[in-house]
Image: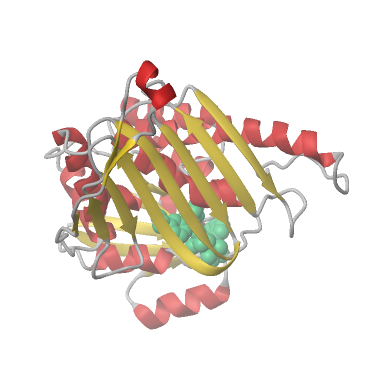
Amino acid sequence: MISVGVCGFGYWGPTLVRAFASNPAFRVAAVADAKPAAQDRVRALSPSVELYGEAQELVDSAEVDVVAIATPVLTHYPLALRALRRGKHVLVEKPMCTRVDEARELVAIAERMRRVLMVDHTYIFHSAVHKLKELKTSGALGEITYYDSLRVNLGLFQPDMSVLWDLAPHDFSIMNYLLEEQPVYVEATGYCHVNQNLPDIVYITLHYAARTIAHLNLSWMSPVKARRIAFGGTKQMVVWNDLDFDETLKIYDSGIEFRSEDERRVFIPGYRIGDIYSPRLARGEPLANLVEHLHRAIAGKEEPVVDGRAGLRVVELLERTQRALDSSLGKIAGLHTPKAPARIAR
Ligand SMILES: NC(=O)c1ccc[n+]([C@@H]2O[C@H](COP(=O)([O-])OP(=O)(O)OC[C@H]3O[C@@H](n4cnc5c(N)ncnc54)[C@H](O)[C@@H]3O)[C@@H](O)[C@H]2O)c1
């Protein structure tokens, strides 16, 4: 069995511990959390687990083969670096880290040490994403025209990161996986209502060379939770409502008839309204799929789908978007009460 140590037992750490404990290939050997209340919860849940107050001590433990990092984002880089240098495999929460140079260093050391570095971009293991990929790859959707994401809820406000760094990694990882290209131009704007350095609403528009546009509406200020992605093609369009467990994906056999430039001046576009189909999706839990994939990657049976390079591409996109956001917030600052350009807190 592979022994795993989980750093951080706050909101997401217990979910990781459960996922590892449910997979027969792994044994949860150790958990680290700085908070006494979290340590009490670990003791109540599994008294035999080795408990640490400081994540670095867990990373140094000879008992641990894999380090899973579910601590706040600013700790990801130093903990992952330390673990890789000690020859451990690493599963690090999204986003992998807060800077591109740090991400590159993690990729390089993982490759040098021949250790698996995986990022928990959980959605890549979601059956809806697999279906979208299949529809795109088979050509069923036609040419991809847009990706439109609504990812909003009330909070949870993070003390050390903006809504961009909290929620955009989900969409960026899905978009990178589906589109397999990087945008040529990124626009972003937003607003800091609560913490003047950390935007709580962010709107992002990404333009791709291949006639695709993407838009993300990210918010911690919405009274209702929504997780809705529309993925459009010239032949079919798909709406993925992650909160609808019966009809999670709906495929619309609808489209616009594209016409030549000459015709467009004279005619309105033709609309094609066809059937709506909701495919049956595999019900497996994405995190359980990710943990099994990690097991197979460590055993050398599969190449990691969300390896350090995939994590790096997400951090690159986050940095590009942050620059666009800083520029926009800098310009509008004079129109409102003056505020410093928003950055992820360092
Ligand atoms: N993949 C997903 O869908 C998903 C969902 C939620 C959160 N996350 C990610 O998980 C990570 C943690 O988020 P969270 O919401 O659980 O945060 P959290 O604040 O609820 O928990 C973090 C825990 O880490 C502990 N901690 C911090 N530094 C420590 C250290 N040096 N040593 C020991 N313990 C330490 C804190 O005491 C806290 O209990 C973030 O990167 C977040 O983006 C991922």
**Image location (x, y in percent) of residue 189:** 65, 40
> On the picture, is 331 further left or further right than 182?
right
**Left or right for 233, reference 76:** left
x and y percent of residue 90 in the render?
35, 45
Report the front residue among 93 and 150. 150
Residue 271 seen from this side = yes
Q: Nearer the viewer, residue 262 or 195?
A: 262
In the current view of this chain or complex, which residue is farthest to the top? Answer: 262
Q: Note whether residue 306 is visible.
A: no
Picture quadrant of residue 154: bottom right
| Between 118 and 168, the one nearer to me in the picture | 168
Residue shown at 25%/49% (left/top)?
273
Q: Residue at x 33, y 52 (%)?
A: 122
Residue 59 % position (x, y): 43, 50
The one of 145 and 240 positioned closer to us in this rendering:
145
Is residue 173 toward the left or the right of residue 162 in the image? left
Q: Residue at 39% of width from left, 41% of height from top? A: 147
- Residue 156 in the image, given as x and y percentages of width and height: 57, 65
The residue at the far front in this view is 266
Total marks shown come to 0
Q: Residue at x 25, y 67 (%)?
A: 21
Quadrant of the rendering where the C terminus is positioned: top right
Q: Residue furthest bottom?
A: 44
Q: Residue furthest left?
A: 301
Is 32 positioned to the left or the right of 280 in the image? right
Image quarter hosting the N terminus: bottom left
